[in-house]
Image: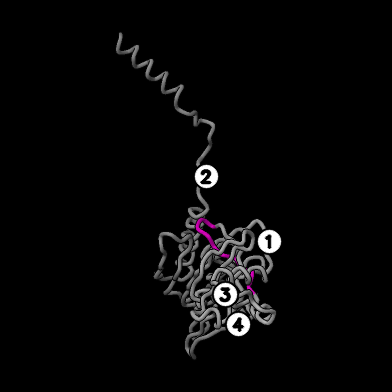
Amino acid sequence: MKRLALQLLFALLLTICLPDRSFAGPATASPVVVLRAQARTALDDLRRANGSSLSVHWPVYRATPTMVRGLALALPGKDLAARARSFFARYPALVASSAELALASPRGTRTRRVLRFRQTYRGLPVLGAQVSVSFDSAGRIRALHSKAARVSLASTTPALTAAQALALVYRKIGAAPPSARVIARVVPTLAVLPQPGGKARLVYAVTPPMEVNPLGLAHTVDARSGAHLGAHRAVLFHAARHRQGVRR
């Protein structure tokens, strides 16, 4: 009897102390989990349409695959760019949801063509984000390489001007303030910097001239707070040298 009373008391204490989850509803999946599930479904559809197995490279930290090979897809379109866009329209989950892709210069050989698309967000370049589609001589899609990023920004209006971002970088590297000639010649690019979890930062990508920047580093400055976010080899910021697909 004493044991039963203790068990009832213990059950009562658990009821009081533990939170009531009966009205919490189902747990909400994270955006990355949702995107991975959508991409997995798209891959299954792609395998069926392709009629053969695919070689897929998909790092665990990414929401979408970085490479899909083994394709032999003949899609509608008057040219290769139109066929690539047909692919994006059919399998949007493989290139990041709602990604805006701007065609860059095509390259390739007589038997293999590669079209490269740079990702934009509300007209701004997304740093480091691009998608490449390979075609064979018959115009069939053979491979997809994607560095598309899921990004979301509340606003694309900067608090800093481009000139202020340039001056901030000059102070950071210990150089004298830029002259009027430099300010006119070196125009920082307003861009989007992807962040983990699908968020993003509005930034200026700034590459000072060689006389004060002998290593050719590209600096990123938060376009709202003015924080200096780092410096990298300029080649890593290919998108910073393009504004809506036009080489500067």
Q: Is there a contact, CB below 8 Å, between mark 3 and mark 2? A: no
Say what amino acid the circle numbered 3 marks: Ala
The answer to whether residue 5 shows anywhere in this view is yes
**Which residues are the magenta region?**
188-198
Callout 2: few (<14), some (14-19), or many (20+) C-alpha neighbours within 10 Å?
A: few
Q: Nearer the viewer, residue 220 or 117?
A: 220
- Which residue corresponds to mark 2? 28
Please name the amino acid that badge 1 sits on. Ala
At 59% from the left edge and 68% from the top edge, which residue is drawn? 89
Mark 4 vs mark 2, foreground winner is 2
**Which quadrant, please, contains the N terminus?**
top left
Q: Quadrant of residue 75?
A: bottom right
In front of the other: label 1 or label 2? Answer: 1
Residue at x-position 48% and y-position 29%: 19
Real-space Cα separation, disc 3 to disc 2, in angstroms:
50 Å
Residue identified by numbered label 1: 159
Residue 84, image x, y percentages: 56, 75
Distance between the alpha carbons at the discs numbered 1 and 2: 34 Å
**How far apart, in angstroms, are the residues tagged by discs 4 and 3?**
49 Å
* Label located before the other in sequence (1 or 2): 2
Q: Is residue 34 above or below residue 177?
A: above
Q: Indicate the amino acid at tag 4.
A: Asp
Which label lies toward us, 3 or 2? 3
Residue topped by disc 4: 79
Q: Which residue is mark 3?
A: 175
Which element carries disc 3, helix, strand or loop?
Answer: loop
Q: Secondary structure at mark 4?
A: loop
- Left/right placement of residue 57 relative to residue 93 reads left
Disc 4 or 3, which lies upstream in sequence? 4
